Image: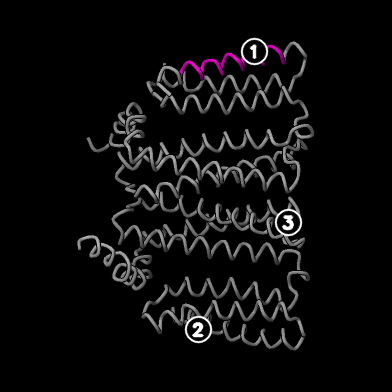
Amino acid sequence: MTKSLCIIVSHIFRLAMVFLFVVAIAIDNLSWTLICLSGIIVSAVPIFLKRYLKVELPDVLDLLITLALFLHTGAVGVFDNIYHILPEFDLVTHFASSVVVAFIALIALYLLDEYWDGLHINRYAMAFAVVVITIACGVVWELGEWAIGKLWGIYFQVDLDDTMMDLLVDTIGATIMAVIGIYLIKNGTLKELTKGLGKLADTHLNKNKQ
Amino acid sequence: MKSGIALSYTLKGIMGLLFFIGLWKQEWGAAFGCLVGLVIVMIPTFVKRRYDIALPWVLELMITLALFIHVSGGVLGLYDAFVRYDTMAHFVSSCLIALLAFTFIYILHVYWDGLHMDKYAMAFVVVITTMAMGVVWEVYEWVVDMLFGTTLQLGLWDTMKDLVMDTVGGIIIAIIGVQWIKTGKMDEMTKDLGKAVDEKIISREKKEKKK
């Protein structure tokens, strides 16, 4: 996918979320409204970073983030009480999120490897680290859901099977992203994708040296 | 150090006794588990004899301790007698995994070209690796339960508690490990194993590439 197309598609997802937000208000569904709102806010983060902090995220990452957020906001609304109707959809959103987390981990590791003295890592070791980081994030997520359920009685976790499936899907998403990551590194795409971020990382990480 | 080795041999001896207790109680499954545990704890000794590679004594003690807790729980029925026993066993096992991960990463860091890592980054990787191994373990239990109708996983609450214990164990070992690196103890402990890995795997691979 070309650069501009990525941006256009991710803007379409943002607009769709705004649309869903309006629908949620119209049908007077408070929780869906709040979820849409938080989705819109998070999806605006890449734009905000670019405008005000001059941090340019790779366009593909931007697209993946908005896609994952769109799936989340769409899922809750369109399949209200989704867990009874379509539990598989929850797995789709989990998969998309884990791919995004893995991609962010990959970019972070790549930048640290390139610009930080504290880390030099072989690309296969990097792929391993990406998988492990994503799985650990999945654990943190599940523990968060669990803690919220215990503290406030809002139960996101359906049962053990559901939680284990989530963790399994996280692992699969991470593994796929890691394999793709190895290829992206090999053919230089990742270097190109992170060009904008790289300069920034360089100035921040090597600030003390200059 | 010497007391650590002595303790590890004492635990191995008790495990031998536990095997006979298991046979005497006619708990064949537990006795078999004990036998498997004994074989595993003898591996470091075997490797030392055969290949002259000594594991760090802390690691050897940790392996023995984790298996000892598991085996004695099985033979003496401690898992059923104490509610917290399973949690404790999980905690010790995750400490072992974290220690293995730390040793492994540190040796790669020192002897392998493909990895150079800041000690805090290392600690981070150790924590998340331990968490990920916890997930692998839980998924394994889940799959076994599904296929064979056993109840290794007692429920969501239990599984979440296990994952928390894994994380805590990982964090504790990561903190200890950073201290060991700072004081040079890590260097000292992994010297034997590191050199052996370097000679037998890393350097040999390099030579083959040169050919």
- Judging by the rendered image, the residue that carries numbered circle 3 is B146
Quarter of the image for residue B90 reads bottom right
In the depicted structure, whether residue A40 falls above or below residue A187: above
Between discs 3 and 2, the one toward the N terminus: 2
Q: Chain of mark 3?
A: B
- Judging by the rendered image, the residue that carries numbered circle 2 is B6
Number of residues whose C-alpha sits closer than 10 Å to that of mark 1, classed few (under 14), some (14–19) or many (20 or more): few
**Label 2: element kind:** helix
- Both labels 3 and 2 in a single chain: yes
Asked if residue A104 lies left or right of residue B27, the reply is left
In the depicted structure, whether residue A33 falls above or below residue B47: above
x%, y% of residue A177? 48, 40
CA separation, marks 3 and 2? 42 Å
Q: Residue at x 68, y 11 (%)?
A: A22
Nearer to us: label 3 or label 2: 3
Q: Chain of mark 1?
A: A
x%, y% of residue B82? 76, 68
Nearer to us: label 1 or label 3: 3
Magenta-span inclusion, residue B164? no
CA separation, marks 1 and 3? 42 Å
x%, y% of residue B175? 47, 56
Label 3–label 2 contact, CB within 8 A = no
The magenta stretch spans which residues? A7-24
Quarter occupied by the C terminus of chain A: top left
